[in-house]
Image (spheres, grey):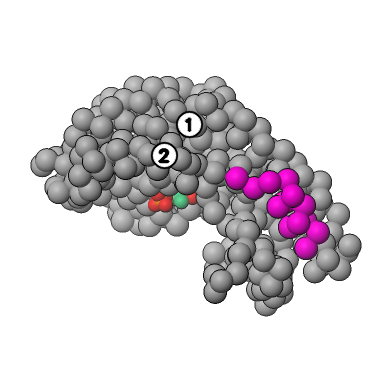
Amino acid sequence: MDGREYVAFCSNDYLGLAAHPDLIEAACEGAQRYGVGAGASHLILGHTEPHHRLEEALARFVDLPAALIISTGYMANLGLITALPGRGDCIFADKLNHASLNDAALLSRADFKRYTHLDLSALERMLESSTARTKLIVSDAVFSMDGDVAPARELLALAEHFDAWLVLDDAHGFGVLGAHGRGVLEQHGLRSPRIAYIATLGKAAGVYGAFVAGERELIDILVQRARTYVYTTATPALIAHALLTSLDLIENGDARREHLSVLVQRIQRGLSAGAWRLLPSDTAIQPLIVGGSIEALAASEKLTERGLLVPAIRPPTVAQGTARLRISLSADHSIEDVERLIDAIRSIQGSA
Ligand SMILES: *Cc1c(COP(=O)(O)O)cnc(C)c1O
C-alpha cells in the first residue's frame, strides 16, 4: 500500500495456495480451453465437464455420496437452507454462526431459534419442545471470529435423536482439518445421511466458490430448488478446472498443514501471558481480545505502522466488550513473520 510492504495477518488463504504457480498455470490452461465466462446458468448451458469432474472429486474427497458447486459460500448457505425448510419448520442455530447462515434462516420463513454458543443442553431443550416437522440444526464447524470448533459429534447425536438435519458450514475447516485436509467430518470420523456439508473454495482452497455435499437425494433436491444455484450464472469452467488442481495441492499439503500448526502453537505460546486475552484456538484463526473498540482500533493502527496488517473486529460483529485483533495465519507465513508479530504485540500491550 502506498509503496510500502506489509505482512498481512488477515487473509483466509490458510494454506498459502492463492498464488501457487500450479494454480496459476491451471487457471490459464482452463481459460484457454474453456474461455472466461460460463455464459449461462448451470441448468441452461453453463454446466460443463470440469464442473462435473470437480463435483465428483469434491464428493470423493470429503467422503460423501454427492456434491454440488454453488458460486459462493454465502450463496450455498442461502440456497441450501431455503430449499429444505419452510413455514412451520424450525431452524436451530448457534448464536455465533456466520451471517450468511442467519440470513438464510430468515429468508427460509421457518422459525428461527438461536442457542447460546456451543450450549448443547440449551439446544437439546429447544429440540425437545419443538413440534416442527422439518428441523435443521445449523452450525459453523470452525467459528469465524473465535476460531473454536463445534462439537460436531454431539450435534450429530442430537440430530439423530430428534430426527433433524445437521447443516455444518466448514468454511474454515475444509483443506485444514482432518487427515489430508478433508475437513471436520473426517476429523471427527462422522458419516450420516442427515448431514448437509458446506465448504467454501475461496479460503484454504485458494480459488473461489463453494459446494454442498451429502446424500444424492439431497443434491438432487438442491439442483431443482436451491434458488442461488438455479437463478444465477454458472461458476466459470476455468475456476472448476483450477479447483481440480487445488484439490490435489490440498491432498498433498501435509507439510503446509504441519507448518501452519507450528505457527498456531507459536502464537499460543507467545501471546498467552500478556494483558490481552488470547482465545484458546488451535485453528488458523487466533483472536486476541482487547476489549474496547477504540483500544482495538488503536492497536490495529500501531501494528500497521510496524508493517503488520491485523484487523480490529468490533461490535456488532462480535459481542460488546470483546473487540479484538483477529489474527489469521497462513502456511505462507514464516516463523520469523510470526515472531515479528508477537514482538510487536507484546511491545504495544506493554508486557514486553
Ligand atoms: C467465508 C464464510 C462464508 C462465505 O463464503 P464465501 O465463499 O466467501 O461467500 C460462509 N460461512 C462461513 C462460516 C464463512 O467463514
Quarter of the C terminus within the rendering:
bottom right
Locate residue 48: give its quadrant: top left
State which tag comes first along the sequence, 1 or 2: 2
Residue 135 seen in the figure? no
* Residue 87 percent coordinates (x, y): 27, 49
> Mostly what secondary structure, the magenta segment?
helix
Q: Amino acid at mark 1?
A: Leu
Locate residue 130: give its quadrant: top left
Magenta region: 332-344
* Residue 270 percent coordinates (x, y): 81, 50
Picture residue at 23% right of the left edge, 41% below the top? 32
Residue sitting farthest toward the right: 352
Picture residue at 31% right of the left edge, 31% below the top? 54
Q: Which mark is residue 23?
A: 2
Where 337 sits versus 29, above or below? below
Picture residue at 49% right of the left edge, 32% below the top? 250
